[in-house]
Amino acid sequence: MNTLSHCPYRQSTLLQQALAPDKMRIAFLLGAGCPASIRVPEGQETRPLIPDIRNLTGMVNDRLSKSDAHKVHHATLLKRFSDGDPAQPTIEDILSHIRALQDVVRDGNIDGLDKAALAALDAEICNITTEVVGVDLPEWNTPYHQLATWIRGIQRAHAIEVFTPNYDLLVEQALEANKIPYFDGFVGSKQAFFDLTSMESESLPPRWARLWKVHGSVNWWRQRIDKSHNEFEVVRTDKPSSEGRQMIYPSHLKYDQSRRLPYLAMLDRLREFLARGQAVLVTCGYSFGDQHLNEIILHGLRSNPTAICFGLLYGARAAYTDALHKAQRHPNLSLLAADGAVLGSVERDWRADEQTGHPQHGFSVAKKAAAENAGAESQNCEFLLGDFKHFGNFLAQQLSRSDDEQVTPNAA
């Protein structure tokens, strides 16, 4: 055994043990890699159910560049990024820039972009994004269904909390398909209103899951409630008014109170979760590329040494250099990639020896077959849980094992 390596079997067992106690406070952070891991048929091949942020940005830019109404203003806007940072902006960077320009342009224009042109670009980007991400969850047993089943499967002292920067409605669909009550900060039906008091209260029963959408949602709208006083509120609805403005992605810049409140309240829930007692945060499909979220997570881990974060990374860890550097300074941040991990601030490869009899073999850990040529080096084990599909299977297996343990004493 190589002592200068981490054991993937041990880490998957530790994760399983962290999620098992019914009195543990547990939350999940589901990033853009989660819906991208679900493949749906497209002709003779398959495609992601929802593309990741880079591919989504490509789709939005392609549509805008072909639009007679928007292509000139879109090209002008992208040119403003040509000599700046980031060099390859995502739609979130673009929306942030548009909204910053709207705050300063007033009745004039900047590079030919006036307030009307900027508002039209903002609305069209949100329209295209909604069209792409506002899809239905497949009816078959997706990882979202498996997560929802896991949430329902164990009676707990504390509610399970799900945080996501995704704008889609996949978590909601999975929870509803499994008849799991949940609270997302809004109350009502036709025009569900945001209720901060209920968010800050712990009076809801633990069987109600909590869903916090930290970057907004395709069904959040900012609507005028008093024209005479120019007052607005954010509602959750599938039938917005003609004057409504979709609430996708906060730029973390200057907002009036009605725009800031939902986002800031959702982020405060993440701060609060990490601040109190023993807490386990599991991220999946999240690349640690959102510096605002990272700041909250890392501050929480520094402030509360009894909190721990398991970051399940898709693919090799070389793609996450900045995140690895952060984990090397935060011993309660464990980053687990396919080819290795940072555990207790120490970065190492996974071990090469596989344990085919281990309960997690095939669920959390696998090993590629050795190359046929005799001189090939032995392959290290591969950690699978950074792929949301495997993480769903992992949760389903844990629930199955829990059920077996409950019925075994009676079976004798």
Image (cartoon, rainbow, N blue to C red):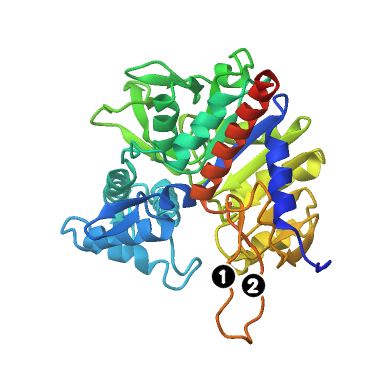
Foreground of the two, 298 or 209 = 209
Q: Quadrant of residue 3?
A: bottom right
Which residue is identified by label 1? Answer: 369
The residue lying at 73 percent from left, 65 percent from top is 351
Could you tell me which secondary element the residue under label 1 belongs to?
Answer: loop
Q: Amino acid at mark 2?
A: Gln
As shown in the figure, which amino acid type bears the numbered disc 1?
Ala
Callout 2 environment at 10 Å: few (<14), some (14 to 19), or many (20+)? some
Whichever of labels 1 and 2 marks the residue nearer the N terminus, that label is 1
Residue at figure coordinates x 35%, y 49% from the top left? 49
Q: Is residue 97 left or right of residue 191?
A: right
- Residue 379, disc: 2
Position of residue 264 relative to residue 285, above or below, is above
Q: Quadrant of the image for the N terminus?
A: bottom right
Q: Measured from the top left, where is residue 66 in percent x and y?
A: 19, 62
Residue at disc 2, secondary structure: loop
The reply to whether residue 301 is in sight is yes
Local packing at callout 1 (Cα closer than 10 Å; few below 14, some 14-19, many 20+) is few
The picture places residue 390, in percent across and down from the top left corner, at 53, 49
**323 vs 248, nearest the viewer:** 323
What's the distance in space between the residues labelled 1 and 2, CA to CA?
8 Å
